[in-house]
Amino acid sequence: MASTSGETLHDCEAIELQPSKLSSSSKPKVPRPDGGKDAWLFLAGGFSVEALVWGFPFSFGVFQEYYSSHEPFQSDGGIAIIGTLSAGLMYFMTPVVIAACKRFPHLRQLCTFLGLIIMSLALVASSFAQSVWQLIITQGLLYALGGCMLYMPTMQYLDEWFVERKGLALGFFFAGTGVGGVVIPLVMNWALHKWSASTALRIWALVLTAPLIYFIKPRLPVPADHKATRNQRLDFNFLKQPVFWFMEIGNFMQGIGYFIPTVFLPTFAHSLGLSQIAGSSTLSLLNAATVVGGILLGALSDKYDVINVMVFASIGSVISIFLIWGFSTSIAPLYVFSIIYGVFGGGFSSCWASMVKRVQSKDSRAEMGLVFGAFAAARGIGCIASGPLTSALLKGGKDWNAGAAYGTGYGLLIVFTGVTALLGCFPGIGKGLKLY
């Protein structure tokens, strides 16, 4: 989640140590922040969590290609729902888990432990699946639930372990998504075709229990008076601001189409007669470019009006989709598309922090966590909705009589992805009308 997790961290406020309010009469020993064995071991554990939790759904395109060409799932058109549901639910549940962790901070460690168990069991259960609906429940729904429960408390802990050196820590932490997104598609492609989906999923379930997970824990004890904050009322007045809704709609529409290439690029490459390693390589390139795009667009949104950056990112995505993917009939242009789309499409959500600031410029009482959660939830809903839509678009695209990639059966899918990317410009309309 390299392009979105940084914004989540702003809301994951560290629980300050208050010695006078600790329930214990003796003052516990607290590890120092920004260094030392415990801090660096935590960071190594956080890197592994970032890579394992997000790298898997972002690499689902490899499974999409495998399931589509192997029994007993080959004839089922709902395979894409698995990947979009997994990623979408993790986005959608972000505000819920963040709110729960803030309300019940003493349960955060239990939340991470249960999340890890649910993720591992979900993958083991999916290895026994004999139908797509069983994969949707296990590899889609349950994996997302466990992943979100493991990931969000880890983000909160990072804010405790690193204060002065937080930038360095964040860079290393989020590098996990880049490494996972590049390595996992290649490793999974190899494992799926060397063994089987069942064996690959069981091995991956074991990988999730890596020893580094042991070091995912808070640095600070929970204050004895943490119950006092439970009854605080939330302020939703920011929902009255037009700028929020224009950005939310643009964010939602971009989310509907964004994950389509991550799911279908390997399958599309296979339809062109390209090798399996070529297909998985497109996914690795896209994920690597997403990290670069997140840094680039995040920096631009800090310097310029975030609405202009959203329009810029959307136009870049549209050009790559219609003019490069739409005319790709060999591996070279497909690689170029993966890189350009990864930068512009993948980096889009790095604008969220500046989008929140834009809302706060109109409503100073708007809470970072609530607004950010609304953006994450909208992207999640869009992602979930894209699963059933892509199945219908693939069926309709078979009858298209067009040239280049538009005539491969993926034509409608390419056009739909381009149109939703264009609608990411929606906030620019409100700005042009001077509504905010």
Image (cartoon, rainbow, N blue to C red):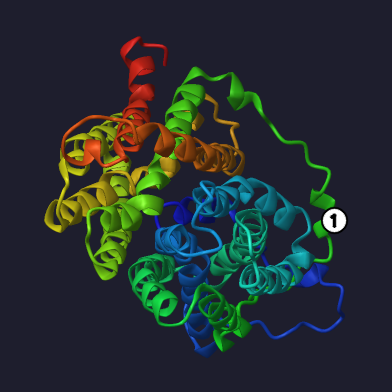
How far across and how far down the image is residue 353, in percent?
44, 43
How far across and how far down the image is residue 380, in percent?
55, 43
Question: For the residue labelled by badge 1, is the local secondary structure a helix, a strand or a loop?
Answer: helix
User: Residue drawn at (51%, 73%), measured in percent from left and top?
Assistant: 197
Quadrant location, the N terminus = bottom left
Q: Amino acid at mark 1?
A: Lys
Quadrant location, the C terminus = top left
Residue assigned mark 1: 227
User: Residue drawn at (41%, 52%), measured in percent from left and top?
Assistant: 263
Left of 114 or right of it: where is 193? left
Up-down relation of residue 86 to residue 280 (above or below): above
User: Residue drawn at (41%, 74%), measured in percent from left and top?
Assistant: 188
Question: Would you say residue 184 is visible in this rendering?
Answer: yes
How far across and how far down the image is residue 204, in percent?
53, 78
How far across and how far down the image is residue 430, in percent?
38, 16
Up-down relation of residue 1 to residue 242 (above or below): below
The answer to which of 233 and 150 lies nearer the viewer is 150
